[in-house]
Image (spheres, rainbow, N blue to C red):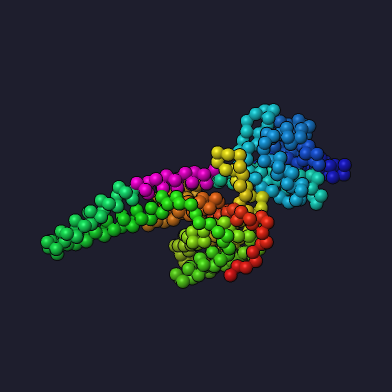
Amino acid sequence: MGALAEITTVPPDLRLVVDALPNPLVVLDAYDRVVAVNTAAEDFFQASSTVLTRLSISELVPFSSPALQSVKKVRESVGVVNEYAIGVGTPRLGGERIVDMQTAPIGDDGRFVMMMLLRRSMAQKFDLQLSHQGAARSVSGMAAMLAHEIKNPLAGIRGAAQLLEPSLGDADRGLVRLICDETDRIRQLVDQMEVFSDERPLERRPVNIHVVLDRVKQLMVAGGLDGVTIREEYDPSLPAVHGSSDQLVQVFLNLAKNALEAMRLSEGSGELLFTTAFRPGVRLSVAGSSERISLPLEVCVHDTGPGVPDELLPHIFEPFVSSKRSGRGLGLALVAKIVRDHGGVVECKPRQHKGTTFRVLLPLTPSADNAPLNLETR
């Protein structure tokens, strides 16, 4: 009863702090009974603390909710578990809501568990990721149409212009060259978009993500950094990614180049930081099914640039959206497509002090759960 007393008799000052939290907070005892809630939880579940503390967790959430499994995992591992985009509601009151949930033990024995519900966080970002996937599919269909309907006429226009050139005067030949240059420019744009129409299955194999990032760093250094420094903070025990090495190089090269251009335009210098980490608590719902996939491999590209404008941030992975005056808005759309093809997600968020972070979450290789961790990075 000592530990329970400590939780249920919260000091008045601490109670004020807990009640000031904007996110619902629920504390469960060893029998999964609610023993403490904050004001935000009362609002969320539409019930007073007196009512809520008479209930068990199974009476607060649907019986099939991943929240129940999260509590069980926390008790078994005595570690933090994160769930994203899960359904939480009150069977007694109805009204399921989609939230993030962070579950953590209180103390070292795992008897008491704290659940925090995050209503405006990664759940929205993962929902947005699904819209990025839909946007990529829309571009795929458009790219296939453009390749067929535009490239062939362009070849005819360019060929006709070249046939006319010998019979024209010097002044008119300049116009012919303008026609040829513009048709070449349009063709290059269509060629870029054709990448989105490639829906062939990936040739996957275990990929050491640190080898991929080292390759990206070599390419960045070879292209010139102009005062920007590159730094790495890697988890050397990260398991292998299940994917295509070449395409993953393309993803992180695009992100690194965007970061470099942003820093050059703002101050001409800065720091580009690559980080990797293992996040075993990250899981994502699969659209159209009850399956939830694990995305524990985190790779981030951080910069110290001016950041993405707030109005563009929700649409940054959509095609033809760019903060650069001369940008075509296809680079990040391609990043979203490749990451989606790998079964992962990508998000963009501001850094705490200055700059932007692009975060990519990827699945393990199918056998990685039982395989020894790969300590080699080169």
The location of residue 187, given as percent across then percent down, is 31, 55
Q: In the image, is 218 to the left or to the right of 96?
A: left
Q: Can residue 220 be seen in this view?
A: yes
Q: Main secondary structure of the magenta part?
A: helix
From the top left corner, tell me how far across and down residue 21 is, in percent: 68, 43
Judge whether residue 65 is colored magenta: no
**Vertically, is 329 above or below 211?**
above
Compare residues 199 and 74 and report the one nearer the observer. 199
Q: Residue 42's image quarter?
A: top right
The image shows residue 146 at horizontal and vertical percentages of: 33, 48
Residue 121 position in % (x across, y down): 60, 45
Which is more toward the observer, 318 or 304? 318
Q: Quadrant of the N terminus?
A: top right
* Above or below, comparing residue 167 to residue 26 in the picture: below
Which residue is painted at 67% across and 41% down in the image? 66
Start-end of magenta stretch:
127-145
Residue 25 appears anywhere in the view: no
- Image point (41%, 48%), residue name: 140
Residue at (41, 56) in percent of width and height = 324
Residue nearer the viewer, 86 or 152: 152
Quarter of the image where the C terminus is located: bottom right
Instruction: Report if residue 135 lies within the magenta region.
Output: yes
Residue name at image x 66 percent, y 53 percent:
280
Residue 72 lies left or right of residue 208; in this view the side is: right
- Residue 38 lies in quadrant: top right
